[in-house]
């Protein structure tokens, strides 16, 4: 099911966006497209200590500015992006089980990482937990 859906995901746009996030000084620990089975759509999930420290409002404000700076080449919308706290079970499970170095390009379909089910994901980066 998830494999057919990845075709519609802007993988290259996501890569350009994450690269711009890095250039802005935000060092992500996790950057990946993840299929959300509940809403049957993909979300670009980002986790970074900067977002954990500064909060969601500041994080989304910074991401909106980055997106605006990439227009018209990147058509992604802020509603496609999710900031995930580094302590969330999903983030901890991924970082405890998988390592994907930037710029990545690893696909995970039907996987379970430390008890967390990942139906489908395309990872640019997952830094191992320390």
Image: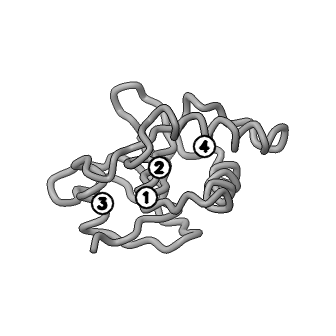
Question: Left or right: where does residue 99 sit relative to residue 88?
Answer: right
Q: Are marks 1 and 2 in contact (CB under 8 Å)?
A: yes
Q: Look at discs 3 and 1 and give the one toward the viewer.
A: 1
Q: Earlier in the sequence, mark 2 or mark 3?
A: 2
Q: Earlier in the sequence, mark 2 or mark 4?
A: 4
Q: Residues within 10 Å of mark 4 (few under 14, many from 20)?
A: some
**Which quadrant of the figure contains the N terminus?**
top left
Q: Look at discs 4 and 3 and give the one toward the viewer.
A: 3
Residue located at (24% from left, 67% from top): 96
Pick out the residue farthest to the top.
39
The answer to whether residue 87 is above or below residue 76 is below
Q: CA distance from mark 3 to mark 1?
A: 8 Å
Q: CA distance from mark 1 to mark 2?
A: 5 Å
Q: CA distance from mark 4 to mark 3?
A: 21 Å
In front of the other: 9 or 96? 96
Q: Which residue is mark 2?
A: 46
Q: Earlier in the sequence, mark 1 or mark 2?
A: 1
Q: Which residue is mark 1?
A: 30
Q: Secondary structure at mark 3?
A: helix
**Which quadrant of the figure contains the C terminus?**
bottom left
In front of the other: 91 or 98? 91
Q: Secondary structure at mark 2?
A: strand
Q: For the image shown, how many numbered marks are present on the structure?
A: 4
């Amino acid at each position: 099911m998830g494999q057919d859906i990845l075709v519609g995901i802007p993988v290259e746009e996501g890569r350009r966006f994450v690269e711009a996030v890095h250039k802005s000084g935000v060092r992500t620990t996790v950057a990946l497209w993840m299929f959300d089975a509940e809403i049957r759509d993909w979300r670009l999930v980002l986790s970074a200590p900067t977002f954990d420290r500064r909060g969601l409002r500041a994080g989304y404000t910074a991401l909106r500015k980055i997106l605006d700076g990439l227009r018209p080449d990147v058509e992604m919308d802020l509603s496609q992006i999710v900031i995930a706290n580094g302590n969330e079970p999903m983030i901890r499970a991924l970082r405890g089980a998988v390592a994907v170095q930037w710029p990545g390009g690893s696909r995970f379909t039907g996987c379970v990482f430390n008890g967390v089910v990942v139906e489908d994901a395309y990872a640019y980066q997952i830094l191992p937990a320390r």
